[in-house]
Image: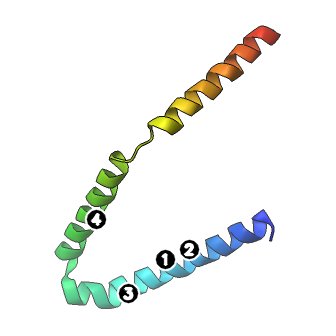
Amino acid sequence: MSVGNTVGNLYALSTVGSIAGTLATSFYLIAIAGVNTLILSQGVLLLIISASLLFMDFSRKTEKNCQDKRIETSININVT
């Protein structure tokens, strides 16, 4: 399977999900829960996701990226 085919499939899936989410929200969720409840629940969900990402350990990846950039910089300096 090629990269273009995979990207196309993901884009199509995203479009179908967006359409389903829009229809579900406009016809069912607003009628059941109300706008204020939906906005509040979305805000809480975003806070939970951002807090979980904040506490993840990115130090190893960041340290490795910095070392790679230092090596590239030293190679560029030595070549010129």
Label pair 4/3, CB-CB below 8 angstroms: no
Label pair 1/2, CB-CB below 8 angstroms: yes
Q: Position of residue 49 (x, y in %)?
A: 33, 58
Quarter of the rendering occupied by the C terminus: top right
Q: Which residue is mark 2?
A: 14
Q: Which residue is mark 1?
A: 18
Q: Position of residue 71 (x, y in %)?
A: 68, 21
Circle 2: is it few (<14), some (14-19), or many (20+) Cα within 10 Å?
few
Q: Which residue is mark 4?
A: 45
Q: CA distance from mark 1 to mark 2?
A: 6 Å
Mark sitting earlier along the chain (2/4): 2
> Which is in the foreground here, disc 2 or disc 4?
4
| Local SS, label 1 | helix
Vertical arrangement, residue 58 with respect to residue 21, above or below: above
Please give the name of the residue rendered at 49% of the width and 77% of the height, measured from the top-left corner. Answer: 18
Q: CA distance from mark 4 to mark 1?
A: 18 Å
Q: Position of residue 34 (x, y in %)?
A: 19, 81
